[in-house]
Image: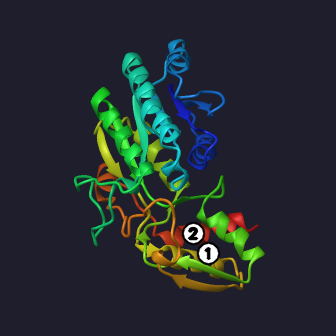
Amino acid sequence: MKTVLVTGSGGQLGMCIKDIAVSSKETSFIYANSSELDITNRKDVFSFFIDKNIDYCINCAAYTAVDTAETEIEKATKINVEGVQNLAEACKEKGTILIHISTDFVFDGSKITPYLETNQTNPKGVYGKTKLQGEKVVKSVLNKHFIIRTSWLYSEHGNNFMKTMLRLGKEREVLSVVNDQKGTPTYAGDLAKVILKVIETNNSSFGTYHYSNKGVTTWYEFAKEIFEESKILIDLKPITTAAYPTAAERPKFSALDSSKIKSILNLEIPFWKKRLKKVLSKTNK
């Protein structure tokens, strides 16, 4: 039986993994949230690994507050870079395969077609820069690793855009949402299934991959779909990024090309609208 450690298990991806893993009979899971395993504490990480035979470590732990990262540079670096290094080194010592989750924010958004794994990275903000540094750490420490970049994650768990829109839809009559940033909403449950398929199939095609649902949209169109599917009546207005200034600069276009992982794992990737409809039907019950 394989043993899999899930760090950052209190976040939405960790919780989606937990939902799916209950049906897994050949894999044992260890879930550790930030209070149970602080990845920034090197001593704690190594002692956590020492008496366990962990085959895979799925690192869902991350500092993801994009705007706050601009002022909390040290904290973002500690979690997204130093913490990742601690995990990578512990994995190397124990012969554990690391599956590390990264982001579309490692790109600058200057493309107009979906990003390939081989495209030039050029993050705009502190969050993207620290996530890219974390990727580089993984590559420099470990040969046996998977880095999976994803985009616009949402689910029935945790805090995310979908849940924020559902809340605001009940609280407000008018709402403005940015309509000139393009990307792909990705259901965290679909990403969780992909990660578990990597493990279940004993895949050894190590390296960097992209995974998101199919299609390209804007935050405004994403919000519109959420409200329409949930039958929430609201005056939704499209605005430009310039009209809604934020501390961190976002990529204008950050859709990811998932064809590499689709081919390696023989995946069927759902279209974002179809998947959103299914998730909302569960969430709105």
Q: Percent x, y for residue 25?
A: 57, 34
Is 49 situated left or right of 267 in this image? Answer: right
Q: Give the residue furthest to the top.
A: 51
Is 197 situated left or right of 163 in this image? Answer: left
The residue lying toward the viewer, choosing from 50 and 141, is 141
Residue beneath the point at 61% across and 68% down:
278
Marks 2 and 1 in Cβ contact (< 8 Å): yes
Mark 2 to mark 1 CA distance (whole Å) = 8 Å
Q: Which residue is mark 1?
A: 226
Q: Which residue is mark 2?
A: 276
Q: Amino acid at mark 2?
A: Leu
- Does residue 111 lie above or below 11 as drawn? below
Q: Amino acid at mark 1?
A: Ile
- Does residue 58 lie above or below 93 as drawn? below
Helix, strand, or loop for circle 2? helix
The residue lying toward the viewer, choosing from 66 and 3, is 66
Q: Percent x, y for residue 41?
A: 53, 23
Helix, strand, or loop for circle 1? helix
Residue beneath the point at 52% across and 56% down:
67
Q: Quadrant of the C terminus?
A: bottom right
Numbered label tally: 2
Colouring convention used in this rendered image of the protein: rainbow
Q: Residues within 10 Å of mark 2 (few under 14, many from 20)?
A: many
State which tag comes first along the sequence, 2 or 1.
Answer: 1
Is 78 situated left or right of 18 in this image? Answer: left
